[in-house]
Amino acid sequence: MENYYDMLMKDVRFEEGLHACMNCGVCTAICPAAEFYIYDPRKIVDIVQTADNDEIEKLLKSEEIWYCGECMSCKTRCPRGNAPGLVIMALRGLSQDLGFFVESEKGRQQLAIKRTVGEAIINRGYCVHLDMLVPELHPEQGPNWEWVYENRASLVNRVGGNFNGDGPGILRKIPEETLDELKKIFEVTGGMTRYDKIESSSKKKAEELNLNLDEGIDNEYFRHIYKTNNGTHTKQ
């Protein structure tokens, strides 16, 4: 079995985020996610500090590591200068690299993030673009969103934007040379490799669940991970 603690130590975020936790619980007290989710950053850091391989593997396969919002409130209050949020980032990265993320409901949603936000950055230069906010997938936008979505180009341009147009302006079309540079950054930093690992692990999980997984978002597995909620994540 691989030594997960040693693997975490190779991540600069882990090295910077964990110095000498004294288990005081201040990080949990200040954590917005801990207020709503069944989530305790103090316990996660405590488990990691033990360097217990079996317990760390459970974390890598757990729901808990996906509850953090990465707001870094924990860093601002820790008397020892720890940053549990950075430890969580390292755990998430390792979970993705090892394919463990598909063992939890929230972890499986990494494919949805990759195929929406992740691919939007690479292909369009935006984390979120109005073209992506299809009403059927975003009921949280409210009853008027369908009209806004259908009229998005004229609305953006009316307030001085340049919707999918050449040249400057809000929501402009990003030049190809800029997108090529973005892709190179992702390739050099290992981002594209991680994307590939998310895809390959998700493909295996889809086969295990007997769900179809094609390109894009119009397939059984994507709809499953996007909409499924077992109702056990938040505090009652």
Image (spheres, rainbow, N blue to C red):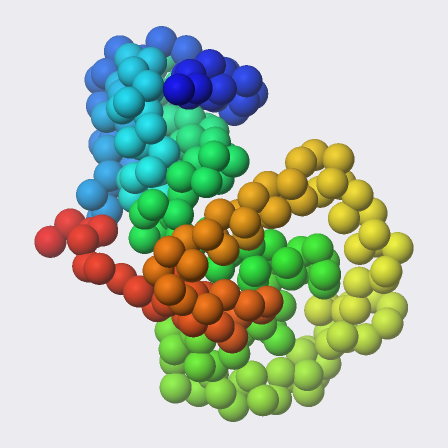
Percent from the top left, x then y, of residue 102?
39, 47
Q: Residue furthest left?
A: 236
| On screen, residue 39 above or below 172 | above
Rendered residue at 54%/85% (across/down): 148
Which quadrant holds the N terminus? Answer: top left
Percent from the top left, x then y, of residue 7?
49, 19
Of the pair 140 and 88, the residue shown nearer to us = 88
Rendered residue at 73%/76% (across/down): 163
Residue 145 in sight in this render: yes
Percent from the top left, x then y, of residue 71?
43, 40
Instruction: Give the left or right position of residue 218, taking residue 187 as reference.
Output: left
Instruction: Give the left or right position of residue 123, taking residue 83 as reference.
Output: right
Residue 32 in sight in this render: no
Instruction: Give the left or right position of residue 200, taking residue 89 as reference.
Output: right
| On screen, residue 118 above or below 9 | below
Instruction: Give the left or right position of residue 186, taking residue 8 as reference.
Output: right
Rendered residue at 36%/34% (across/down): 60
| On screen, residue 188 above or below 150 | above
Percent from the top left, x then y, of residue 228?
30, 65
Q: What is the tally of numbered marks visible in this picture?
A: 0
